[in-house]
Structure formats: C-alpha cells, structure tokens
Amino acid sequence: QKEVEQDPGPLSVPEGAIVSLNCTYSNSAFQYFMWYRQYSRKGPELLMYTYSSGNKEDGRFTAQVDKSSKYISLFIRDSQPSDSATYLCAMSEINNAGNMLTFGGGTRLMVKP
Amino acid sequence: GAGVSQSPSNKVTEKGKDVELRCDPISGHTALYWYRQSLGQGLEFLIYFQGNSAPDKSGLPSDRFSAERTGGSVSTLTIQRTQQEDSAVYLCASSLGGRTTDTQYFGPGTRLTVL
C-alpha cells in the first residue's frame, strides 16, 4: 500500500462546476500538506500549503485537512478550462531533514468549456 | 528571475548506454532535489543536496544511479547501463533552504526514453 493514495481520474467537469480532489494517507507523522498543479509537459507548481486541520482558502481554491481521518481535499470553485491539469497532493513531516516530499499519484482534471 | 532549468528536455537512448541529466537551480537556492515521475505514478524522491553534499541518498533505485552537485549550483544525475524501466520524466527542484517550509520549485523535467 502506498503512503499517499490519490484517484488518478480523469475527472471531467463542465466549466463553472465545483471540483473536489482528494488524497488519503497512512503516515500519521505527516504534518505539512501541499497541493501542486502540473500542466502537460511542465514541472509541478505549488498551489497551496497548510499545516493544520481545517480549511484554508485562496481565491477559488480551498484546501481542507482532516488529520483524524488522514484525508485531505482541494476544492476548486467556478472551474475554468485553464484549470485543466494534473493535481498532485504532497506531504511531509515537520522535522523532516531534507524536506523530502511524499506525493500522491496525481488526479487528471479536465474542465470542458 | 529565471526558474529551474533542465537539459536535455528529451533524451532517447539505447539500453545499456549511460546518460547524464543536468539541472540548473534558481540562483541562491541551497537545496536541490531530484525526483522521478513514471507514467501513472507520483513523484518518487531520488536524492537531496544541501550545498554540495547529499545527506540523503536513500531514494536512488540502484547503484547505477549517481548524482553530484558542484559549486553549490549545477547538479548532474547520471544513470549507467540504462534499462527500459528507467524510462520516466526526471524532475529537478530547488528551494531556498532545506526546511519543511521552503517551497520547492520544479524544473520542466527531462523525458528519458530507453529503447
């Protein structure tokens, strides 16, 4: 079993829809959670990060962490065709020497005009 | 300023040949990371450099893989006697330091195909 599980999709939604992307993890030492977005043939770019349980909002994006369930989510409101990409969750331990990140496999999102 | 750059962008090689992949981190970033991304897989951590030293080599898949960093800047990942299972996108990232809170900035990757 992988440390971080993520549904690969693809997830296809119409423009304007609310998108929910999720990851589960097994390592209770993970304390720092991130979402990266990766466009085709590009490197991942950091979208959001959070340390604590609860919600964090940034524009159309909301990151949610439930440490008791070992479950994290990314919500995208009013999705746009430009949001079409692969979304990768990543996480690490706080006192992780070297800042090694453990990634999920990524969910491919397609937003149709 | 310039982001992380990697070269070549694509590399096709024959099984058994050696390959070298290059990474130029963001200027001033002391930490540098190599990851591998295979089809349908997440990013797999390979190695981390703080300055020129690599305190964590645990992710290198075999002794055919090696990496070095010189002058606290450019890094080279070398794969000897390539195998077909080495085919993947090799991503490099850099961060200001090696702390958890330091954002890792990724390059575009080198797509390696071993025939």
Image (cartoon, grey):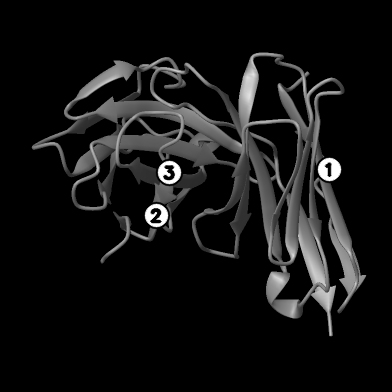
- Residue at numbered disc 1: A7
Chain of the residue where label 2 is placed in the rendered structure: B
| Residue drawn 14% across the image and 36% down it | B72
- Residue at numbered disc 3: B104
Q: Give the SS element for disc 3.
A: loop
Q: Give the SS element for disc 1.
A: loop
A76 vs A48: above or below: below
Three-letter residue code for mark 3: Gln
Q: CA distance from mark 3 to mark 2?
A: 10 Å
Among the 4 quarters of the image, the one containing residue A64 = top right
- Residue at numbered disc 2: B107
Towards the viewer: B76 or B62: B76
Residue B114 visible, this orientation: no
* Mark 2 Cα shell of 10 Å, populated few (<14), some (14-19), many (≥20): many
Q: Position of residue B115 (x, y in %)?
A: 49, 47
Q: Give the SS element for disc 2.
A: loop
Outermost residue toward the left? B71
Q: Position of residue B32 (x, y in %)?
A: 31, 37
Q: CA distance from mark 1 to mark 2?
A: 25 Å
Chain of the residue where label 3 is placed in the rendered structure: B
